[in-house]
Image: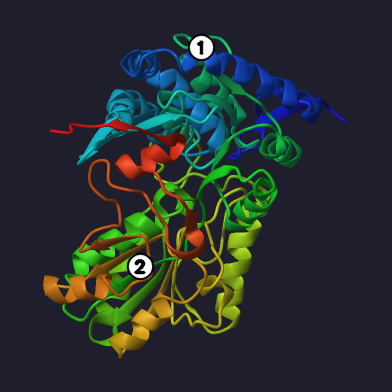
């Protein structure tokens, strides 16, 4: 068995590069080094930790084209999006670190004869396990709050995209003390060994099933967890919706990153009265999308991350068509490594494509006559990450949004929120959450120190 991890370009299977696989037996020693490093790191004042972490931002921006091309070669998304992801991470890093620092400032609570100070102290060592679909943005989402909070971090990126994650850590490590941020590489064996090691917290973004396994493995040590898991996001298009606006959002969110996005729109429920016009417009927009390799500057969508994911998406499409779904766009003729942007109509709740996460470039449309029934369908299943509602009567649309079992809901827009608002899932789409003061504080130990207050 090779001890090297090969990273392959999903467009053509070519090897992008290799990295040594971390032996699972060595992970306890790596975590021990992280603990040793954390003792000095936590003593550095919060403002200085912010400066040391944020120093990587300009370096990422300077190297955006180089690192963006590496990201795209490894993950498959078109080059312009890979460069954009790196550039965004660089430009957002300082603000992210500052938001975390603000959340961690001590708070004083006085009540009669007692004054209490609430501190947010480091936990120790945080394990970060990140996915492949946004292979720089997702590590940053978890690594930055953990580091700013004074924890040491051991990062295990996806085995599909190890090179760009290592490059990201290398840039951060140009200003960080030794062993405060370490990276391990491998697949399930390395992830399991890391979760079972002497870490105090696990931050994970990935599939629901992997999240369940991590929660079970972490239970024995009662380790802190923040799990951002899968989704099966619904979009409800009401009978008074702006068809052009709703169709544009449906296509953008169904197909972004080739549908390989946790808040991708995977189920669309449209009112009968406007269904025909809506379906036609979605199919037109989807048919205009171009697919291509990472270095095709005309391409808007890249390949599936691997053959397994491609086969999963195509099997769901084929099953739906066999069970009566109408193909409005795509549906067949998928080039090797790719899935053609596909629009299906007349999908039903009995089809697997309306129940299981797809994670591919497919828009599934179901018509409804009764709004209450549509809401009931939208709320079915174990997932509850994002959702959206479109309707001209904003008050009515907002009332529908409040009835949806999702952590984030958009009204006449996607579910993406403003600023540092929480990124949060309901039901089995998440455990804990990111963003906002409350989210950042999950990477810290809340500690209350009380003393006699003003007795006058």
| Cα–Cα span, label 1 and label 2 | 57 Å
Relative to 401, is 359 on the left or the right? right
What's the residue at 31%, 27% (across, down)? 101
Say if 164 sits above or below 367 in the image: above
Q: Between 103 and 226, which is closer to the camera in this rendering? A: 103
Residue toward you, 76 or 180:
180
Residue at numbered disc 2 = 283
Residue 288 visible (yes or no): no
User: Closer to the camera, 383 or 244?
Assistant: 383
Residue 375 occupies quadrant: bottom left
Pointer 1 residue: 40
Query: On the image, which quarter does residue 97 sit in?
Result: top left
Instruction: Give the quadrant of the N terminus.
Output: top right
Left or right, 256 with respect to 420, comes to right
In the rendered structure, the answer to whether residue 343 lies left or right of residue 284 reads right
112 shown above or below 167: below
**The C terminus appears in which quarter of the rendering?**
top left
Q: Give the image location of residue 158, x and y in percent.
A: 61, 37
Report the residue that reaches farthest toward the right. Answer: 1
Q: Position of residue 370 (x, y in %)?
A: 30, 90
């Amino acid at each position: 068995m090779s001890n090297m991890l090969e990273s392959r370009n999903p467009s053509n299977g070519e090897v992008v590069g290799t990295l040594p696989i971390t032996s699972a037996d060595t992970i306890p020693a790596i975590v021990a080094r992280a603990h040793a490093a954390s003792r000095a790191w936590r003593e550095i004042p919060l403002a200085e930790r912010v400066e040391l972490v944020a120093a990587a931002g300009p370096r990422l921006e300077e190297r955006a084209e180089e690192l963006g091309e590496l990201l795209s070669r490894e993950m498959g998304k078109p080059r312009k999006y890979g460069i954009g992801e790196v550039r965004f991470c660089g430009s957002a890093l300082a603000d992210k670190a500052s938001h975390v620092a603000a959340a961690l400032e001590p708070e004083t609570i006085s009540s009669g004869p007692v004054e209490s100070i609430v501190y947010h102290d480091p936990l120790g060592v945080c394990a970060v396990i990140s996915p492949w679909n946004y292979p720089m943005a997702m590590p940053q989402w978890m690594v930055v709050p953990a580091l700013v909070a004074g924890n040491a971090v051991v990062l295990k990126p996806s085995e599909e995209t190890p090179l760009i994650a290592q490059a990201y850590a290398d840039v951060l490590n140009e200003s960080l003390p030794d062993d405060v941020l370490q990276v391990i590489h491998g697949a399930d064996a390395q992830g399991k060994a890391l979760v079972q090691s002497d870490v105090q917290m696990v931050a994970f973004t990935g599939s629901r099933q992997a999240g369940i396994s991590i929660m079970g493995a972490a239970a024995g040590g009662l380790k802190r967890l923040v799990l951002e898991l899968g989704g099966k996001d619904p979009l409800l298009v009401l009978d008074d919706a702006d068809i052009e606006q709703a169709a544009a959002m449906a296509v953008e969110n169904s197909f972004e990153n080739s549908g390989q996005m946790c808040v991708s729109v995977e189920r669309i429920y449209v009112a009968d009265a406007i269904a025909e016009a809506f379906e036609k417009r979605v199919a037109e927009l989807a048919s205009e999308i171009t697919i291509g390799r990472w270095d095709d500057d005309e391409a808007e969508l890249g390949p599936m991350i691997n053959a397994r994911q491609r086969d999963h998406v195509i099997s769901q499409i084929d099953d739906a068509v066999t069970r009566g779904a109408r193909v409005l766009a795509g549906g067949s003729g998928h080039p090797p490594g790719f899935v053609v942007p596909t629009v299906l109509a007349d999908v039903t709740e009995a089809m697997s494509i309306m129940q299981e996460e797809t994670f591919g470039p497919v828009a599934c449309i179901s018509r409804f006559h009764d709004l209450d029934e549509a809401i009931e369908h939208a709320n079915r299943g174990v997932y509850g990450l994002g959702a959206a509602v479109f309707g001209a009567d904003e008050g009515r649309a907002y009332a529908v949004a409040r009835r949806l079992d999702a952590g984030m809901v958009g009204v006449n827009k996607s579910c993406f929120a403003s600023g540092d608002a929480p990124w949060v899932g309901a039901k089995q789409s998440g455990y804990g959450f990111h963003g906002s003061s409350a989210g950042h504080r999950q990477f810290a130990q809340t500690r209350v120190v009380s003393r006699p207050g003003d007795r006058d």
